[in-house]
Each structure stands twice: as structure tokens, then as C-alpha cells.
Image (cartoon, helix red, strand yellow):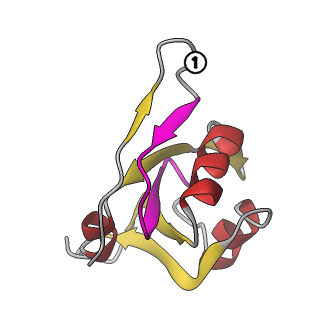
Amino acid sequence: MIKMIKAKPTKSNKRKLEFVIDDLIAIKMRGIPFGATEKEIAQFFEQYQIVENAIKIGVYPSGLKTGEAVVLFKTVEEAKRAVVEKQGDTIGHRWVELIQIKYSQYISFDIM
């Protein structure tokens, strides 16, 4: 059984997140370039332990990319570190927002 994780900014530091212990955690990326590839996203998180072949890039029914993606991390600690350290970094010329999401949201991400 997979437990879900919750993340919330603390009052003292909005970039610092508190995670509840869980088995799997995913991060949603917003604002990625429309031409971003899985390889570029993997490079963005190269210092972190992500699950292999677990990057999903959002695509509208028309086939156009949404500018969003989700990435599954191996541990809560790695996801927490990635959000704190990479929030607001860029891919190409685009500023990227990172948001912790439930595993069920990761699974259903490609359903538009």
C-alpha cells in the first residue's frame, strides 16, 4: 500500500518544505519549455535520485506540450532536497516551479 505525502511551506521559509514519511513521491514541474525533452528534465535533476524512466511530459489531446511534467523520486529526502535546491532554476530560458504531488496524481498525469 502506498501512503501519500503532504508538503507545505513553513512560515519562516517558503522554500523549505516539510514532508510526511512515504514510500514514493513525485514532483510536478510547471513552466518548462514546450520543447523540453525527458533527457533535459533528467539533466535538470542529475544530482538527485529519480526513478529511471519515470518522467512524464504533459501533452494536450492536440499533441501540443503543456509546459508541465512530473518526475518520480526514489526517496522523500531526495524529492525534498530537489524542491528546496532547484525551485526557480531554469531549463533553457524558462523559470521552473516545483510542486510536490500525490503518487495518484503522478499516475494519472498523462490523462488529459
Q: Residue furthest bottom?
A: 53
Q: Quadrant of residue 53?
A: bottom right
| Quarter occupied by the N terminus | bottom left
**Neighbour class for label 1 at 10 Å: few (<14), some, many (≥20)?**
few
Which residue is painted at 63% across and 36% down in the image? 88
Tell me where residue 2 appears, x and y as whole percent: 30, 73
Which residue is disc 1 drawn over? 13
Which residue is painted at 29% across and 76% down in the image? 107
Q: Is residue 50 left or right of residue 48?
A: left
Instruction: Please tell me how many numbered marks the rendered image carries.
Output: 1
Tell me where residue 87 appears, x and y as whole percent: 62, 39
Q: Is residue 18 left or right of residue 102?
A: right
Asked if residue 15 can be seen in this view, the reply is yes
Magenta residue check for 31: yes
* Secondary structure of the residue carrying numbered label 1: loop
Residues in magenta, as a range: 16-33
| Quarter occupied by the C terminus | bottom left
Tell me where residue 46 appears, x and y as whole percent: 77, 67
Asked if residue 93 can be seen in this view, the reply is no
Which residue is painted at 33% across and 77% down in the image? 63
Nearer the observer, 13 or 28: 13
Q: Quadrant of residue 38?
A: bottom right
Which residue is painted at 64% across and 39% down in the image? 84
Nearer the observer, 22 or 99: 22
Q: Is residue 62 left or right of residue 54?
A: left
Magenta residue check for 58: no
Nearer the observer, 83 or 7: 7
Residue type indicated by callout 1: Asn
Tell me where residue 26 appears, x and y as whole percent: 45, 63
